[in-house]
Image (cartoon, grey):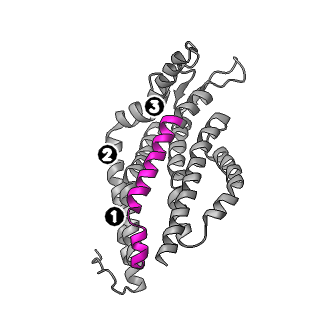
Amino acid sequence: MAEPQEEGAEMSFLDHLEELRWRLIRSAGAILFFAIIAFASKRILFDVILFGPKNTNFPTYRFLCKMSHLLGLDDSLCLSEMPFTLQNIAMSGQFATHIVTSVVAGLVLAFPYVIWELWRFLKPGLRKAERDAARGMVFYSSALFLSGVLFGYFILSPLSVQFLGGYKISDAVENQIHLNSFISTVTTVSLAAGIIFQLPILIYFLTRMGIVTPQILKSYRKHAIVGVLILSAIITPPDITSQILVSIPVMLLYELSIIIAKRVVKKMSVNS
């Protein structure tokens, strides 16, 4: 295993490659570790988490039902049953799904550690001012990612499942959803939301590098709205409800990014 280099010490190209190799190995090991835990926790992973949005007692559905009663809408927003069933048509389908889903769960759980390893690799190449400016990156990036995943899971996923699972073009057609299709919808929506929530981090570094300014972000606000709508149409199931629900938090993140960019520019001008 490569010996850790002292901060500020010169490293050759091969030394950098060796360090990167070991950091990638440790990151992969962390993902594998959590994937094994997820694989062993089959009931929690599937029955409780992934199949949660399929159950009518899911917290989001209960909340909507309570809101329906508070607004005097009777049971119009309450969900009594899911109008679809899940099916598996491949001999090895459930086993393969178990493995792939466990790896995805391992990636989500190991995300803070992977970001920390990436930061430790990049840190020696940064100047002191740059290191100070990026302090807390691991925490904020991890917090935003996990917040996005939770938003995608508790808000976007159940609404997408409810809408798409109950959508019918004719009563002659019965919805029997493929297992992989259902799990893919839940995981894709959740992970996409986690990635989108990294926007403030991206804007922070782009502003530090002088690529983006608050004025640019403001001038392209309308373009950003269109871009967000297009992006939400790509990464979410094809229903307008999910697209709007993705667009609203992303635009709030965009406005937050403008505030962050202003603070970065102000701090840089004071330091200079």
Magenta stretch: give its range.
Answer: 126-155
- Residue 147 rendering spot, x and y as whole percentages: 45, 46
Structural crowding at the residue carrying mark 1, measured as other residues with C-alpha within 10 Å and reported as few (<14), some (14–19) or many (≥20) = some
The answer to which of marks 3 and 2 sits earlier in the sequence is 2
Secondary structure under the numbered disc 1 in the rendered image: helix
Viewer can see residue 179? no
141 is within the stretch colored magenta: yes
The answer to which of marks 3 and 1 sits earlier in the sequence is 1
Task: Name the kind of residue labelled 3 in the image.
Answer: Phe
Spatial CA span between label 3 and label 2: 18 Å
Query: Residue placed at 55% from the left, 73% from the top?
Result: 209
Q: On the image, numbered disc 2 is attached to which residue?
A: 37
Structural crowding at the residue carrying mark 3, measured as other residues with C-alpha within 10 Å and reported as few (<14), some (14–19) or many (≥20) = some
Numbered label attached to residue 26: 1
The answer to which of marks 2 and 1 sits earlier in the sequence is 1
Task: Name the kind of residue labelled 2 in the image.
Answer: Ile
Secondary structure under the numbered disc 2 in the rendered image: helix
- Residue 200 rendering spot, x and y as whole percentages: 52, 57
Q: On the image, numbered disc 3 is attached to which residue?
A: 51
- Residue 99 rendering spot, x and y as whole percentages: 42, 45
Viewer can see residue 241? yes
In the image: residue 21, left or right of residue 83: left
Numbered label attached to residue 72: none
